Image (tube, grey):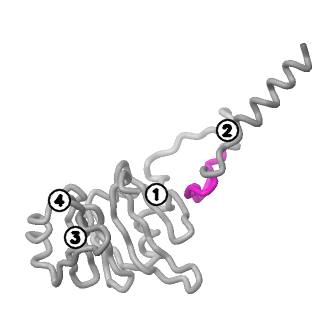
Amino acid sequence: MKKAMLACYLAGGIIGIVPLTYTSLPQPVHELQNTTTPSEWVTVSHADYDLSDIKLQSVYGLTLYDDKITVERMLGKPVRVTRDDYFTEQETYEYPNLDVVFSDGIMEEIKVSGSADTIWIDDQEIPVSIGALIEALGEPDYKADDGIVYERQENVLKLFINYDNGTLESIAYYHISSV
């Protein structure tokens, strides 16, 4: 009986191993560790937290649910409109240091150049630098091979970073379902 239970336990452990594909997903930047016991807990006020007002609801006043008419009303006529050669349903409205990508007329992504001076996120102007963005947005939710990621509900803001030289290459704002 003990051998049967041991065999089931070992088989469950082997079968329960996390699939290898999981290990390739972005991993949290840090893990919360609670080393305090209930008797050590203290009452903390909101003033003790670094709470960010930034909810990633808009970039340059645009939401991910805006259409082409709204984009032109907010940003003006694009400098150029291009279509993807392979994904013909994709159309990009190009502005200085900013691209707005549509797929079948639905906004898919807003891309901001790393050479832009500032970015407007949720009506807050933030300098386009890794340090200023981390200061404004707080600790990233994930660190990826090509940058850091912030998620707020269904919206994602990713800072594409060249880790070889430490520069911010671009910023992408998109819906989590487009990943």
**Mark nearer the N terminus (3 vs 1):** 1
> Could you say whether the residue bearing mark 3 is in a helix, strand or loop?
strand
Q: Which mark is residue 66?
A: 4
Q: Residue 30 lies in what quarter of the image?
A: bottom right
Answer with left or right where residue 94 lies relative to residue 161: left
Q: Label 3 vs label 2: CA separation?
A: 56 Å
**The C terminus - image quarter:** bottom left
Q: Amino acid at mark 2?
A: Glu
- Nearer to me, 149 or 19: 19
Are the residues tagged 4 and 2 within 8 Å (C-beta)? no
* Label at residue 50: 1
Query: Which residue: 17% across, 59% down?
Result: 66
Crowd class of label 1 (few under 14; some 14 to 19; many from 20; radius 10 Å)? few
Residue at the spot of label 2:
40
Q: State the image quarter where residue 171 is shown.
A: bottom left
Q: Position of residue 141 (x, y in %)?
A: 50, 57
Judging from the image, what secondary structure is the residue with disc 2 in? helix
Compare marks 4 and 1 and give the one earlier in the sequence: 1
**What residue is disc 3 on?**
91
Where does residue 124 sit, x and y in percent of width and height?
Answer: 28, 68
Residue 81 occupies which quadrant of the picture? Answer: bottom left
Residue situated in front as seen by the camera: 73 or 39 = 73
Q: In whole angstroms, how far apart are the C-alphas of marks 4 and 1? A: 31 Å
Residue at 42% across, 66% down = 158
